[in-house]
Image: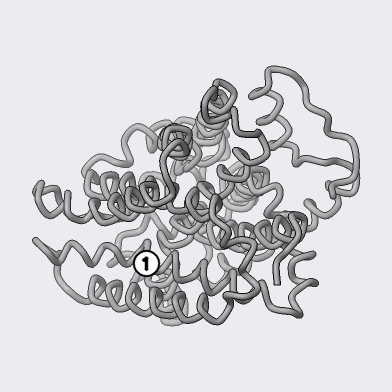
Amino acid sequence: MTLSQSQRNTRIDAVRAVALGVVIIMNMMTFSGLAYLGPELRAQTLGAVDLALWQVLDLFLDGKALAAFSFMFGFSFSMILQRSGPDTVAAPPQVWRRFVVLGAIGAFNAIFLFWADILMTYAALGLLLPLAARLSQRTIIGLGAGLILAGPLVLALSGIDAPAPVPEGHDESLQAFASQNYADAISQNLNMVTGAADGAAGMLVLRAFMLTGLFLLGLAVGRSDLPQRLMTLRTEMFRAGALLLAVGLAASIVLHLADTPRGGWFLLYLDTPLMALGYLLLLAAALHGPRMQRVHTLLAPLGRMSLTGYLGSSILGQILFYGWGFQLIGQLGTSAVIALAIGTIIVLTSFAHLWFRHFVHGPWEWLWRSLTSLRAQPILGRAA
């Protein structure tokens, strides 16, 4: 059984919405202040249940949601190329502008909303996608897998320190973001953008290789006939997803229990992309079940405006936790932050449903398209 273009888009949007939702949950851990605490201070601050929840998030979701979202970024780019026609790859000035505008939006987010922005990284690494799109399918897959594997190998051969959580230990952020003066939040955002990665070269190297590789794998899958055949491949996807998740989880558990890895043990850092791909396979297989239409209808609008959802969660994160808002930073445990994050996702999903009753693009998506095209794009009308 094959799917129509509209059905495929709805299911892809639903998968993207779930990935975005998990990204929002993890970002809220930073907005809440919990991610800035070192392990000892966190153990002293949180109760037993909240500490256990934190460890579950760290083991199962930290980094994996971002990796899954990165794969979907490459997948979405393949759809952009398909809509733009065959000449886009050969003459891509508008494609280049698309990434430049995305980088500018990311810079706005990093300075005024959330310093741990991922859009600038996506824009920089995404510049490789138009070049990669000229290559054969087999070459793209090989490059993607090779780059993911190269990250841990570069760490092992270069002597760079093992990756460490970037915000952890920046206790000064708690006081800065608790200030009732919004200018202090902007100032600390700038401090974190320019200084948070000091001493985190291992994380930056690993992330650069991993994200680029996942971009390429997403591009390759989007160009293949797999999206049209998902209904007939559900059993195989469940099996492959479970295997990747099990292998990645085993590596992640060893990383959490063992001392800092050296040499070949750096391959354990493949846990993140393996688990992310496993999650995506399981999620796509589950969402392509015969009785999942209501779930698609519920989730797809948020996935369709994922840029707006991502930036909107940053705005809501500041309102909830920062000093100029409800001043909850440093006041809540893991379970309460998860509850607020789920509430944020519900608000953003409801907003998406209401918005698409009247407009064809999300607000930030419209701005992105208009700046890329250098002219205002049509926005009025009910989304299909």
Q: Is residue 183 visible?
A: no
Quarter of the view holding residue 277: bottom left
* Along the line of sight, the residue nearer the viewer: 63 or 218: 218
Q: Position of residue 374 (x, y in %)?
A: 68, 17
Query: Which residue position is annotated with label 1?
Result: 274
Which residue shows up at 35% across the image and 76% down it? 249
Which residue shows up at 45% across the image and 71% down it? 278
Q: Position of residue 261 (x, y in %)?
A: 14, 65
- Left/right placement of residue 373 relative to residue 246 reads right
Residue type marked 1: Leu
Q: Is 236 rendered above or below residue 356?
A: below
* Along the line of sight, the residue nearer the viewer: 345 or 223: 223
Which residue shows up at 49% across the image and 48% down it? 219
Q: Is 235 rendered above or below residue 96?
A: below
Q: Position of residue 28 (x, y in %)?
A: 53, 57
Q: Is 43 rendered above or below residue 224?
A: below
* Along the line of sight, the residue nearer the viewer: 113 or 104: 104
* Along the line of sight, the residue nearer the viewer: 243 or 169: 243
**Badge 1 local density, few (<14 within 10 Å), some, or many (20+)?**
many
The quadrant of the image that shows the N terminus is bottom right
Q: Quick one: SS at disc 1?
A: helix
- Left/right placement of residue 278 relative to residue 165 reads right
